[in-house]
Amino acid sequence: MMTLKGKMQINNIIEAKQSSQIHSAEEIKFFIENLNTFSQEEITQWLKAVKANGLTDKETSTLTLAMADSGEVIDWGNLEPTLDKHSTGGIGDKITLLFVPLIAACGINIPKLSGRSLGITGGTIDKLESIPGFRTNLSIDEIKEQVSKIGLAISGASINLAPADKKLYAIRDVTGTVDSIPLIASSIMSKKLACGASNIILDVKCGSGAFMKSLHDAKLLALEMVKIGKSNNKKVRAVISNMSEPLGYKIGNLLEIEEVLEVLSGKEVSDLVEITLCLAKEAITMIGGSESEEKLKDILLGGKALSKFKLMVKVQGGNLSTGFPKAKHIEVLKSNQDGYIQNIDALVLGEAVFELGAGRKTVLENIDHAVGIVLFKKHGDKVSKNEALLEIYSKSKEDADKAKDKILSGIVFGQNQPTKLKLIHEVIG
Ligand code: URA
């Protein structure tokens, strides 16, 4: 129940932020600890004041820790030093599924808690659930036991991680207050702090298919998250990577698992390999190790990471040998012109795959694991009129037909070969 004291304080807190005052740590902790006693209107007023007037680094760090502490905080105990990875999300972004077995094959413990897709952004848990039998609901004790034996686990979170963030995010989502760097940074980092690893590598995506569209905003977010982590005694580094075009050739849950297996079996898909190796190298040096890029590449493509991935799938009940469910309809989309591909818009392709049924609008919706897009051509490739550009995996011919114009609208052709896409913009931390 709301106390008179609580009521008075929330009003003071809202007014303080509305007039750009700096909150004390006590005020922020009070706000988060009593969140469930405030009305949605009160919380919205505070969020709007933060969006308008910002938070100092100290306020943001205190807010993040208070949100992390609103639920369980995992202690990995003798598994330390552990590494965690976070991607701000993108199209065809299957890097976690390459990075985790690579890191485990380097001898670093990686207990990875991942999420499901929301909107056009894919989720690692949905991708893994394309594998028949694969369990994504491990308890924390099961994850600990598995990581102590084989060095890696990827699971959904079975515990209530940062419930204050869940509540605030749900309100931000419907009140136009998602778009605020301190609120985004504290939201992401509260879950990372609750996940408990002592080392965190962040892949901050930037471009049309990313949350952060501009390099400027991606950099601000990366800087803020690194500062939050460091002020909470974590080692944190952020890589800002390009998400203006989809990653790899395959987009869609099951298709992305197929591509992960192809890369781990030696197929050098250049954008996936470059970003995975950069993240791994930065993570390993942050922890104090050193591994040459050549050695990492050999582990990634030469079979060691594949063995770790297959072991993880087996231990988590998955079966890679039964064959995957196929999409009901597969249709080739041919080019309507000659030229070099200048750009494949990640946002447009992400929306197309979402409309085919690969994503969900709310956390409760079901998804179709088999639908998606397989690109035959990428940035810089030469294409002739009527040459196959890509394949659409859909539930029906009608769905494929509906997707065609949209997909073509996202592909830009030109007469000259464009310069190579810059994949890594910057490393921070
Ligand atoms: N992802 C999060 O977890 N929180 C945000 O605020 C935005 C993206």
Image (spheres, rainbow, N blue to C red):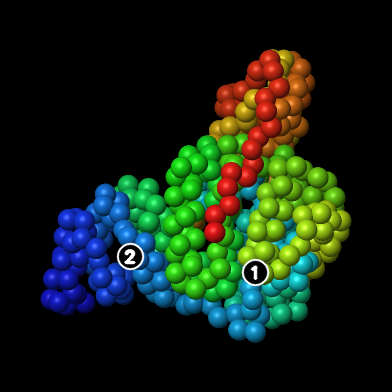
- Viewer-nearest of discs 2 and 1: 1
Q: Tell me which residue sits at (63%, 65%) in the image.
A: 286
Q: Which residue is mark 2?
A: 59
Where in the figure is residue 303, as x and y percent of width and height?
A: 86, 59
Q: Quarter of the image holding residue 126?
A: bottom right
Q: Position of residue 188 (x, y in %)?
A: 47, 60
Q: Residue 275: percent from the left, percent from the top? A: 68, 49
Task: Classify residue 148 by image quadrant.
Answer: bottom right
Dot 2: element: helix
Image: 403 above or below 223:
above
Q: Residues within 10 Å of mark 2 (few under 14, many from 20)?
A: some
Residue 347 shows up from this direction? yes
Hey, what amino acid is under mark 1? Ile
Asked whether the viewer can see residue 318, the reply is no
Q: Is residue 47 above or below residue 268?
A: below
Residue 172, by quadrant, is bottom left
Which residue: 78% across, 58% down? 292
Q: CA distance from mark 2 to mark 1?
A: 27 Å
366 horizontally vs 9: left or right: right
Give, as a three-letter code, the residue at label 2. Answer: Glu
Q: Is residue 55 left or right of residue 361?
A: left
**Residue drawn at point x = 20 percent, y = 60 percent:** 21
Residue 157, position in %: x, y?
Answer: 55, 69
Residue 275 is left or right of residue 114, and the answer is right
Q: Circle 1 is placed at which residue position?
A: 287
Q: Which corner quadrant holds the N terminus? A: bottom left
Whether residue 89 is situated above or below residue 383 in the rendered picture? below
Give neighbour class at mark 1: few <14, some 14-19, many 20+ (Cα, 10 Å).
some
In terms of depth relative to the viewer, which is nearer, 7 or 298? 298
Q: Identify which residue, 420 or 396, lies in the foreground.
A: 420
Q: Nearer the viewer, residue 386 or 299?
A: 299
Q: Is residue 361 above or below residue 329?
A: below
